Amino acid sequence: MEDELKKQKTEEAETTSRREFMVRSCGLGAAGLAGVAGLAGVARFMLPTVTYLTPKKFLVKTSDLPTPGNELVFPDQRVIVLRRDDGHVAAVSLICTHLGCTVYRVATGYQCPCHGSQYDNEAEVVAGPATEGLPWLPVKVVPGGQVEIDSGTRVEKNTFYSVA
Ligand code: FES
């Protein structure tokens, strides 16, 4: 009887120590995770915020704009600048409104190589799957003989600007 009682106490002690071990382990694990999360949060504020996206606004020297009656593609910004015969300019995004591929210029307008969307010369959709026209963008004259084109903003189609 006494042996059995000792054995039962030993088993209880082992069970308790295993339970304590698990509780301590989980506690340490949770504390460790909290510590890592805390360090990550601190590191986020210590490191510079860097984005590799193309900036939405870009500058073009007025001397680099297309000559009257011509147009010029800015491939890095995926924008085309159109210049009427009277010298006014407009900018149109070349980013397909379906899933964002870069459209290219064709005689009838713009063509998307990815899924075949087509746009007319005013950048309106003539064949899907795109359902929206290409965005026309604001062009603003800024000091230093330059214009600023904002590809993050839309304006009415056929909006041309004087750059004189
Ligand atoms: S991305 Fe242009 S049609 Fe799909």
Image (cartoon, rainbow, N blue to C red):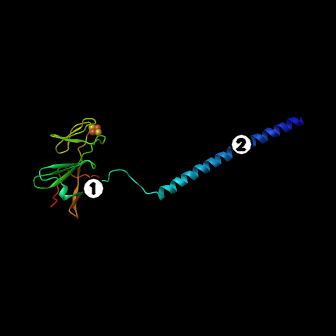
What element does badge 2 sit on? Answer: helix
Q: Residues within 10 Å of mark 2 (few under 14, many from 20)?
A: few
State the residue position of label 1. Answer: 58
33 or 16, which lies in front?
Answer: 33
Asked which secondary structure carries label 1, the reply is strand
Which residue is disc 2 drawn over?
19
Q: Amino acid at mark 1?
A: Phe
Q: From this view, report whether residue 11 is shown above or below residue 136.
A: above
Distance between the alpha carbons at the discs numbered 1 and 2: 63 Å
Q: Nearer the viewer, mark 1 or mark 2?
A: 1
Confirm or reject: label 1 Cβ below 8 Å from ligand 1.
no
Quadrant where the image shows the C terminus: bottom left
Q: Position of residue 8 (x, y in %)?
A: 82, 37
Who is closer to the viewer here, 19 or 86? 86
Residue drawn at (74%, 43%) of the image: 17
The quarter of the picture where the N terminus appears is top right
Amino acid carrying label 2: it is Arg
Which of the pair 120/47 is nearer the observer? 47
Q: Relative to 39, does residue 15 appear above or below in the rendering?
A: above
Q: Quadrant of residue 144?
A: bottom left
Q: Residue at x 25, y 47 (%)?
A: 75
Q: Quadrant of ligand 1?
A: top left
Q: Is tag 1's residue or tag 2's residue first in the polypeptide sequence?
A: 2
In-image side of 104 versus 39 (left or right) = left
Image coordinates of residue 38 in percent, x first then y, are: 55, 54
- Crowding at dot 1, Cα within 10 Å, few <14 / some 14-19 / many 20+, comes out as some
